[in-house]
Amino acid sequence: MHHQRKMNLSSQDMMIFARTIPSIQQRRSYINTIPNQIKRSEAMFELMPLIINKRQCAIYIQSIPNKFIRSEAMLQFSQNIINLTKRRRYIQIIPHIEIRSEAMKNFATTISDPEERRVYIQTIPNPIFRSDAMYDFSLQMSNPQDRVLYIERIPTSGIRSEAMREFSNTIRDMHQRRLYIQTIPNEEVRSEAMYNYTIDMTNLHQEREYINTIPDLSIRSEAMRDFAENIDSEQERHAYIMSIPDQEIREQTLRLFQNQNTNIPDQSKRSLQRQKLIIINYINGNEDKIDLSLFTMEGLKLFCQTYKIPHQKITTKKGFKKAIIKFKKKLINAKKCGQCKTIIHQEHEDFFGNIIKIPVLGNDGIIYDKSSVDQWLRMARQQKRKYVGGISVPNYTIVGGSIPLQNYKQLTKEQYQRYKKS
């Protein structure tokens, strides 16, 4: 049957058919009949993980005719060699230089002795993978002077620029940091470093002038968008926004300031909004109980005022709880009678109190409106920063979840509906 298949099928079809053969030995024999060398090599590569015996697998890999695919198989096989000395020797016989270089870069991370690792990295033949390995190594260096000198020896300009940008974030002296950033060779990476530098500037006039010197127009536009927050005069701010070179960022910034609904409340207001949403979830049937420890008297009172629940004589949290439960039962009965479709019908709000028009999912697992999070993150970047491992980073804080809000991903309408139902 296999012979018949071989006569009727192309090499591509034979490779696909090989996957359906349950016996490894029969599949191996069939693969050897594939006439096209590359397709035969690809089929052998696919079979390789199914060979359990490591010695047999290593021998089989060496029979793969295509040099590149054989090298890829050796790279994958090397990662399963537990003995580091044997893995190191095996990597050296990978025929394809770039793939051998990639394997060497990966192996370098297993060398615990810093000097030994430094020497080994220099033997990586491909300059890009050697540069990558040097970049990773530079991040582990604690002596600033040694790190600067080491970074200068990274052969690839782009990766050397990335390493310089990372190092610039550790320079505490603002003048020295500014001078160092200007020596970064890659324009885009230098622009990113300059953008990061503006976040730590305290003089607004100097910051505005410095932003204008950022060479990459897209990154300069992002810095200008963030700086617009500091301009109090609406007329002056509008003129400044209109000078943003990137059209898309300029239009986004205009929409942001034209949106009068966007409001970033302080911590106490966010707490009240959080309490309100928890009660709404309970009333709408998404929560079974009310945990009074999550609420303040002010939050409970505000909710009752909003939904006209009698509360004037209530003086305790338990009293508010009884009133809310009674309110829920009343609405449930109204729903049963067909007087309302949902228990509390309202446009969905986020923890900032804004209507969710463009839903995004924060890294804290909470759904917000995009405009809310964009403004919140800009504020976080502009406020006092903190140092983590010697690197200046924004001091992000908790909003609606249990971890600080740092980033988000935009949701489609279908995804948003699924999240609302879950």
Image: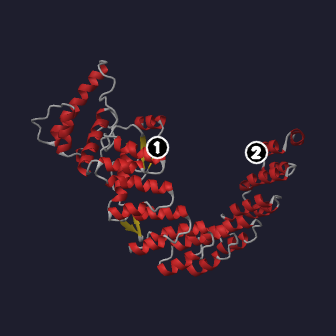
Residue picked out by circle 1? 410
From the viewer's side, name the closer residue of 101 and 339. 101
Q: Amino acid at mark 1?
A: Gln
Q: Position of residue 417 (x, y in %)?
A: 44, 34
Left or right for 252, reference 331: right
Residue appearing at x 34%, y 35% in the figure: 348
Viewport quadrant of the N terminus: top right
Q: Amino acid at mark 2?
A: Arg
Residue appearing at x 17%, y 44% in the figure: 297
Q: CA distance from mark 2 to mark 1?
A: 39 Å
Height in image: 9 above or below 222? above
From the viewer's side, name the closer residue of 45 and 122. 122
Q: Position of residue 374 (x, y in %)?
A: 39, 48
Viewport quadrant of the C terminus: top left
Q: Nearer the viewer, mark 2 or mark 1?
A: 1
Q: Position of residue 260 (x, y in %)?
A: 31, 40
Binning the other alpha carbons within 10 Å of mark 2 as few (below 14), some (14 to 19) or many (20 upward) gives some
Residue picked out by circle 2? 19
Q: Position of residue 5 (x, y in %)?
A: 86, 40
Binning the other alpha carbons within 10 Å of mark 1 as few (below 14), some (14 to 19) or many (20 upward) gives some
